[in-house]
Image: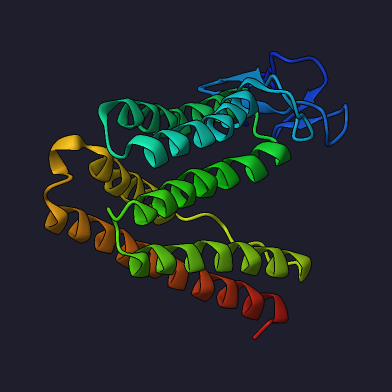
Amino acid sequence: MTDPGPAPVFDVPGERPGGRSDAGSDAPSVTPIGDRVRQLTFGPSALVTPANGITVARLLATPVVVVMVAMHGAGWAPFAVAFTIGATDGVDGWLARRQGTTRSGAFLDPLADKAVVLSLLFVLAAKGEFSWLPVSLIALREVGMSVYRVVAGRRGISIPARTSAKWKTLVQGIAILLALTPSLVSHPVVLTAAVWVAVALTLVTGVQYLLDGRRVARSQRGV
């Protein structure tokens, strides 16, 4: 019989194989790095984290850029602020994965995404850069999907996030940045095409989530 070798060694005292902690469900978990295990900084119940701080900063910066657009329209200053807000969206996600995902972050991050996108779409529509029809379709999908997730969650249905949803947010952000570019203000065809591409992807991902929710509900009923 061959020797099975030494038992696995975990760098964090008290950690069990599989990343479970003896300290309870709210204790920071661990994540594997090759053959080693690194303890995450924050547990799922943490509120004050660097990732959440960046997310809150995005929320606080949103009214600033909205006021800038409302007062002065498209320009490089609001473009820079909006670009910075969008760029930090990936930073807080990276920090959360590295330091530990939290329930508060899972709530705040999509809230910040929707607040930024819808606020800027509304003010750009009010300034005449976008038509109200595509903006309204995007808003209805975003709000409707948020309500659907809450209702589904109360029924015990958890709908996993899709990669296409991040692409949807990215395309929405690109359409907004194009509308904030001074040299494109006189090219409404470009802006109209961009916002309708965003509408198409937004509606497609909404349908995907509805189908995912129905599939999860059917599997839970054993159908």
**Residue at the extreme front:** 71
Q: Position of residue 177 (x, y in %)?
A: 28, 40
Task: Locate the N terminus and report the quarter of the image it occupies.
Answer: top right
Q: Quadrant of the C terminus?
A: bottom right
Residue 104, percent across and down? 71, 38
Instruction: Residue 157 in the image: state x and y as whole percent.
Output: 69, 67
Left or right: where does residue 26 sit relative to residue 55? Answer: right
188, 30: nearer the viewer? 188
The residue sitting at 79% across, 34% down in the picture is: 45
Q: Identify the residue at image location x=29%, y=56%.
A: 128
Residue 142 in view in this figure:
yes
For the point 66% across and 45% down, which residue is it? Answer: 107
Q: How is the image coloured?
A: rainbow
- Between 52 and 69, the residue placed more toward the observer is 69
Using residue 1 as the reference point, say whether residue 81 is left or right of it: left
Q: Residue furthest bottom?
A: 223
Residue at the spot x=48%, y=63% of the render? 139
Residue 183 image offset from top left, x and y in percent: 13, 37
The answer, for residue 4, to whether it is visible in the render is: no
